[in-house]
Image: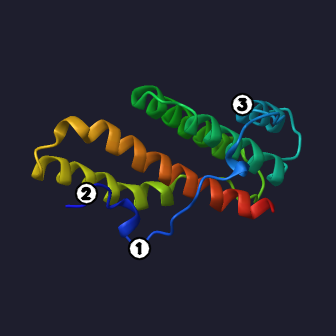
């Protein structure tokens, strides 16, 4: 099998861009946005998407798969909390489509590693595919504010 079939699953290739850089970005954290909404402030969709994008960019910077996934799961928890406090009809970031798309890829990587007796490469290949999926998600959300 090919070394990396992720981009062969009818997914566009996304090249890393300067827009994925987190240098000199000043955005509120998602937790700060939750606190603002809790105190009665209006939920600014653009600010929310920028904050979400920033969190995704921070995840892309992490080299350790365990830490990377822990940060991702924390992001999911914060999004869930935000959904609970959202009293407006704003479109909130959701990782549901991310999970639908990535689950097929994760299973394929797992199967390829088992089928080719390359289990030792599983972590590296999974992290590479996970990063590509995060970049795709980031691209989608950044397009909404550009």
Q: Which mark is residue 119?
A: none
120 up-or-down from 130: above or below: above
Question: What residue is shown at x 48% (from left), y 32% (from top)?
Answer: 68
Please tell me how crowded label 2 is: few (under 14), some (14-19), or many (20+) other residues with Cα within 10 Å.
Answer: some
17 up-or-down from 143: above or below: above
C-alpha gap between disc 1 and disc 3: 35 Å
First in sequence, mark 1 or 3: give its number.
1
C-alpha gap between disc 2 and disc 1: 14 Å
Mark 3 or mark 2, whichever is nearer to me: 2
Q: Disc 3 vs disc 2: Cβ atoms closer than 8 Å?
A: no
Residue placed under numbered mark 1 in the picture? 10
Question: What residue is shown at x 40% (from left), y 50% (from top)?
Answer: 129
Residue 125 found in image quarter = top left
Residue placed under numbered mark 3 in the picture? 31
Viewer can see residue 94 = no
Describe the element under mark 3 as helix, strand or loop: helix
* Quadrant placement of the C terminus: bottom right
């Amino acid at each position: 099998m090919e070394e990396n079939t992720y981009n062969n699953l009818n997914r566009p290739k996304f090249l890393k861009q300067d827009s994925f850089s987190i240098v000199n970005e000043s955005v509120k954290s998602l937790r700060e946005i939750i606190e603002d909404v809790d105190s009665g402030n209006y939920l600014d969709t653009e600010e929310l998407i920028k904050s979400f994008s920033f969190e995704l960019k921070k995840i892309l910077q992490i080299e350790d798969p365990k830490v990377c996934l822990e940060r991702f799961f924390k992001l999911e928890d914060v999004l869930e909390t935000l959904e609970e406090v959202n009293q407006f009809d704003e479109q909130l970031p959701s990782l549901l489509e991310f999970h639908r798309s990535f689950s097929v890829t994760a299973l394929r990587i797992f199967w390829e590693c088992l089928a080719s007796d390359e289990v030792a490469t599983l972590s590296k290949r999974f992290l590479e595919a996970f990063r590509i999926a995060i970049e795709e998600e980031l691209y989608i959300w950044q397009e909404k504010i550009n």
